[in-house]
Amino acid sequence: MVERASQLPTEPFTAERTWEVEGIPVLSATVSLPEPVPAADRVSRRIRRYYRLQCRAFLRYCEHWLLPQAEIEYHAALAASTPMPQFQAALGYQITYDDAGIWSLYTQSREVMLPGQTLLQRHGDTWDLRTGYPAALSDFFPRRSGWRKRLLAFAEADIQRQEAAGTARYRDGWRRELRRRFDPMNFYLSAQGLVFFYPMYAIAPAIEGIPTFTVPLDACGIQWSVPHAGPDGQEEGPPNAP
C-alpha cells in the first residue's frame, strides 16, 4: 500500500513584474504562492503546477486588463500635468488548514488602481492529499442533507447578529443577494471550522471587505468524507484555476 502524506510542507514561490509606458513605471505586480517542497510525488507536482499556472494567469491578467487602464491614467496625468500614477497589484496566500490529509488555503489578490479604489478577490482551495484532487463543499455533508440551505441560514443568522451588534453593515437586499451570489467554490477550512465567503461588494459595501462566515465542524451536520479520486492519469489542477 502506498503511504499518503498527511501534511504538505511548502515554501513561498515569488515573482515580480513592472510595466512601463514611455519609460515610466505605471504598474507593478507581485506574486507569492505556495510551492510543495520537495515536489517529489504526483500529488505535490500537480499542486506545484497548479499554483505556477495561477501565477502566470495573474500576470497575464495584469498585462491585458490592468495595464491598459494604467496607460489611460498615465496619459491623462501627462495632459493635466499631475503626478504620474503607479498602480499596484499583488497576489498572496494564506494556508488555513494542514492536517489529516487535508490541505486548505485561500489566495487573494489586491488591486490598487486609483486613490480610494482597492479591489480584493479571493479564491479558496481545499485539497485531499489522499487522492491528489480538490474537495468539493458537498463532501463535508451527508448526502441529501440540504447543506446549501443550512449554510445560507447560518449566514443569515450571523448577519442579523452582526447588524444588531453594530459590528458590520450590509447592503440593502442582502438576503436576496446572499442566495443569488452564493458560490460553492468559495470555501476553505480552518482550525475553527468551515469558512465560506462572498465576493467584495456582493452583499456588503467595500468597507466590509470580503464577507466570511465560519461554521464550526460540529454544526449543520458537517463531516469529512473522502472525495472520489479523479480520473486515472489525469494531471490537471482544480477546475477553479483563475
Image: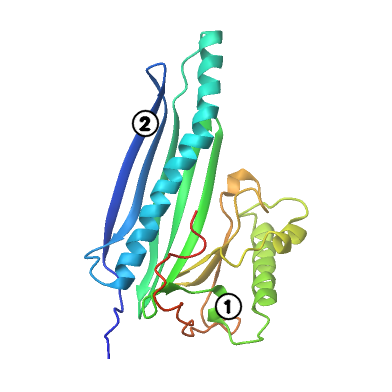
Can you say whether 23 is above or below 173 in the image?
Answer: above
Find numbered disc 1 in the image and state the secondary structure of the residue it sits on: helix
Q: Residue at x 37, y 80 (%)?
A: 130
The extreme front residue here reads 233
Q: Position of residue 100 (x, y in %)?
A: 35, 81
Along the horizontal axis of the image, is 52 left or right of 231?
left
- Count how many numbered circles sit on residues in the image: 2
Find numbered disc 2 in the image and state the secondary structure of the residue it sits on: strand
Disc 1 marks which residue?
138
Q: Residue at x 61, y 44 (%)?
A: 206
The extreme bottom residue here reads 1
Q: Mark 2 is on which residue type?
A: Thr
- Rate crowding at label 1 as few (under 14), some (14 to 19) or many (20 or more) other CA atoms within 10 Å: some
Disc 2 marks which residue?
18
Tell me the distance, in whole angstroms, between the alpha carbons under discs 2 and 1: 41 Å
Colouring scheme, one of rainbow, by chain, secondary structure, one colour: rainbow
Q: Position of residue 63 (x, y in %)?
A: 46, 35
Q: Residue at x 73, y 61 (%)?
A: 180
Q: Mark 1 is on which residue type?
A: Ser
